[in-house]
Image: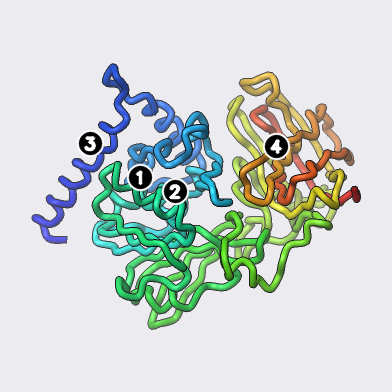
Amino acid sequence: MFPRQRLMHLLSLGLLAFCIQASVLAADGTDRYAAARERMVREDIAASGVTDARVLESMRLTLRHEFVPTAQRPLAYFDMSLPIGQRQTISGPFVVAYMTEQLEPQPTDRVLEIGTGSGYQAAVLSPLVGMVYSIEIEETLGRRAAATLRRLGYKNIVTKIGDGFAGWPEKAPFDKVIVTCSPEEIPQPLIDQLAEGGLMVIPVGERYDQTLVRLKKQNGILERTDLVPSLFVPMTGIAEDTREVQPDGSQPSLANGDFEACLPESTTPTAWYYGRQEQLVESDDAPGGRRYLLLENHEPGRPAHIFQGFPVDGRRVSHLAIGLDLRLSHIGRGQQANEWPGIAVRFFDQRRSRSSRVVLGPFPVRENWDRVTGQLVVPLWAREGIIQIGLMGASGRMEVDQIEVRSIPR
């Protein structure tokens, strides 16, 4: 970028930051969400491995609460996905920051985003790149996101409503492509519209067995790097309806419950995602196979956990029977009275507009491997579940292996 162009870009970033901050000033002139954003960046994003200073600053300045429904605003700056309507969610802050960092955004980039959703991901990209072109298939969400982005003063984001997997041919080629919904295979139009040398970050795979991958286009061929397992909400339209592998909610189960399978050339377990303070341990001491999972936390209140999603049809399943091999040591209370090691399942209905959370635990200290079992009631309206295994804010060591979920018919 020439010096004058660079100066103008920096000035535009400063003006954008000013507009962002000014739009949430309270009556007394203070930014009521600034402290929450700072905590989010420090504890949920930077502490979990995102290091790009520009990405961290954009996360610090972008007003996430403006992109969620009013009823969800108290939760806007916690590291969790939130419903935004039309069976869709806004991704958790860490996921947004991680995907943005993997995209390696540059000031001159032209970026194509597939799945506008709330508009938050585009807003985070805005001060980091030249232009963002964003497509949303759901008309209601697309119109709402466009209005929010316009109200907040984002000038370098262009949105449209349509089939994102068809891309945006008239605006191609793109230096970067970011996809926030998960197809089984990478759509060919997105490959065709990616510029030579460009990067794409996209989750691909079966409905509950997805991997976030980064693709670089070299001599017309995509070089693939598997990053982490992921879980994005169901797509809408033909792409979701025509999946070759459809989930069976009558037979809920977990994949890789023994932690033996890992992504290529890594120690990242497949099927499990969004882990915090976790690591695989190879040992003859493992109850099954050669590996088990260690979760360890030294700061009360800080998360140490791992997740997996699965289908479950509450019309056909009355309870989930859960079993795992468990070892706990040096356990201390978290910041809240209910922060003790355990297992939680959050159930969602078909539209993801209704949810409930049930907990198995808390677990008492057991310094030797022990088989733990229990049952959780499945709501009649449930169609999907996400299991969370962890210290739940407590300090100490939690070692787990051979995790199983099976259904008890209604």
Spatial distance from mark 2 to mark 4, Cα to Cα?
Answer: 23 Å
Which of the 4 quarters of the picture holds residue 339? top right
Spatial distance from mark 3 to mark 1, Cα to Cα?
Answer: 17 Å
- In this image, 378 relative to 153: left or right? right
> Considering only order in the chain, which callout, 1 or 3, is on the residue closer to the N terminus?
3
Q: Amino acid at mark 3?
A: Phe
> How dense is the environment of label 4, judged by Cα within 10 Å: few (below 14), some, or many (20 and up)?
few
Query: What is the secondary structure assignment of the residue under circle 1?
Result: helix
Q: Which residue sits at x=12%, y=60%? A: 2
Say above or below: 333 vs 205: above
Q: Amino acid at mark 1?
A: Thr
Spot the residue most to the top: 28
Q: Which residue sits at x=87%, y=38%? A: 374
- Say if mark 2 contacts mark 3, CB within 8 Å: no
Checking the image for residue 148, the label placed there is: 1
Residue 83 in percent (x, y) is at 55, 43
Of tags 4 and 3, which is closer to the observer? 4
- Say if mark 3 contacts mark 1, CB within 8 Å: no
Say above or below: 35 vs 42: above
- In this image, 153 relative to 159: left or right? left
- Say if mark 2 contacts mark 4, CB within 8 Å: no
The residue closer to the viewer here, 312 or 14, is 312
Q: Amino acid at mark 2?
A: Ser
> Considering only order in the chain, which callout, 4 or 1, is on the residue closer to the N terminus?
1
Checking the image for residue 356, the label placed there is: 4
- Identify the residue under disc 3: 18
Checking the image for residue 158, the label placed there is: none
> Considering only order in the chain, which callout, 4 or 2, is on the residue closer to the N terminus?
2
